[in-house]
Image: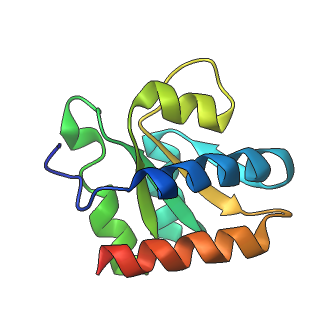
Amino acid sequence: MAEYVKFSIPDGLRNSQSSLLEKVRKSGKIKIGSNEATKMAERGTAKLVIIAEDVSPPEIVMHLPIVCRERGIPFSYASTKKDLGALAGIQVGTAAIAITDEGDAKKEFADFTKKLHEMAK
């Protein structure tokens, strides 16, 4: 596990994260890339930040959990950059994404972020 990964995500929660991202991709708004995720987190407009666990060098994303905690933004992890890119709907990998609008998935989003909050304690 990389040094910036603060907790591990159980398989059940990873599956619900995947289905949530599919719904958000269709009706909500996602910002793709570590720079975009950082901007959205710093501005406080991100509702959830998801970070890939296999980013190299780790300095690219190691600030994101800190920024998210400072701003009270929930954050999660994806196994690989390739998986995260696929979940975001692009053909290449990405180090991080930020969800800025959950779209039609408001209830599922609230349930997911509540579970994340309980895990991150």
On screen, residue 50 above or below 114: above
38 or 88: which is nearer to us?
88
* x and y, in percent, of residue 48 in the image: 54, 64
**Residue pictured at 34% horizontal, 67% vertical:** 67
Residue 112: quadrant of the picture: bottom right
Question: In the rendered view of the protein, which quadrant contains the N terminus?
Answer: top left
Residue 102: quadrant of the picture: bottom right
* x and y, in percent, of residue 83 in the image: 50, 30
**Residue pictured at 79% horizontal, 64% vertical:** 105
Can residue 44 be seen here? The reply is: no
Q: Is residue 46 left or right of residue 80?
A: right
Question: In the rendered view of the protein, which quadrant contains the C terminus?
Answer: bottom left
Q: Is residue 81 left or right of residue 55?
A: right
On screen, residue 61 above or below 12: above
* x and y, in percent, of residue 82 in the image: 47, 24
Which color mode does the image show?
rainbow
* x and y, in percent, of residue 47 in the image: 59, 69
83 or 61: which is nearer to us?
83
37 or 119: which is nearer to us?
119
Can residue 48 be seen here? The reply is: yes
**Residue pictured at 32% horizontal, 74% vertical:** 120
